Image (spheres, grey):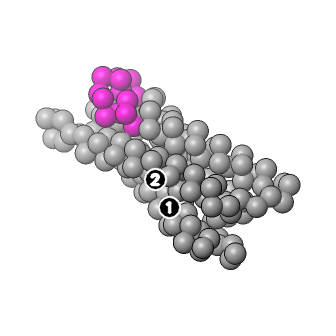
Amino acid sequence: MRVLAGSPGTWSGLSLRVGQSVFAAASVFVTASALSFSAYTAFCYLIASMGLQALWSLGLACLDCYALKFKKDLHSAVLVSLFVVGDWVTAILSFAAACSAAGFSFDRSSASVCELIFEEESLSKFCKIERNVTYFCYIISTCCRLANDIFTTTNDG
């Protein structure tokens, strides 16, 4: 079977999983650092889904490390199917959480929670930049993993 870049048990797959874990953890950290995030369900859901994503990606990164260290093949149909289903579930949950948190607005000229908590202009700009970069990078890495899982599944047969 042809090994694709980013597939399970490769260095590129490990780097994608580590990237997913880092960006999910950054999203949890930034959201949880807000003073009253728990008052808004969208942000609680974001923390829960990104926490699940960080754990899932970290677990699969450990599996990639194991496969690389001991030269194991992770391309069996059962394992790849598990990766596909797990990635789809976490991708849908994370995308829904990111959309609900990003689409949140207030009566005060559509300021975000981050902007309301950090009313200083410099911190408010940081919140916008960090949120957009984190969501963008997370969505890109998740799309790469899903596409890779689909191509790996179709090339198994």
Picture residue at 78% right of the left edge, 55% below the top: 67
Please provide the residue range marked out in magenta.
34-46
Looking at the rendered image, the quarter that the N terminus falls into is bottom right
Q: Are marks 1 and 2 in contact (CB under 8 Å)?
A: yes
Q: Would you call the spot at circle 1 few (<14 residues within 10 Å), some (14-19), or many (20 or more)? A: some
Query: Which x, y percent locates residue 44?
Result: 37, 29
Going by the numbered disc 2, the residue's amino acid type is Trp
Name the mark on residue 90.
none
Cα separation between marks 1 and 2: 7 Å
- Whether residue 16 is visible here, answered yes or no, is no
Picture residue at 57% right of the left edge, 52% below the top: 82
Query: How would you classify the magenta stretch by its main secondary structure?
Result: helix
Looking at the rendered image, the quarter that the C terminus falls into is bottom right
Going by the numbered disc 1, the residue's amino acid type is Leu
Picture residue at 29% right of the left edge, 28% below the top: 40
Name the mark on residue 146.
1
Per the image, the residue denoted by label 2 is 88
Magenta span includes 82: no
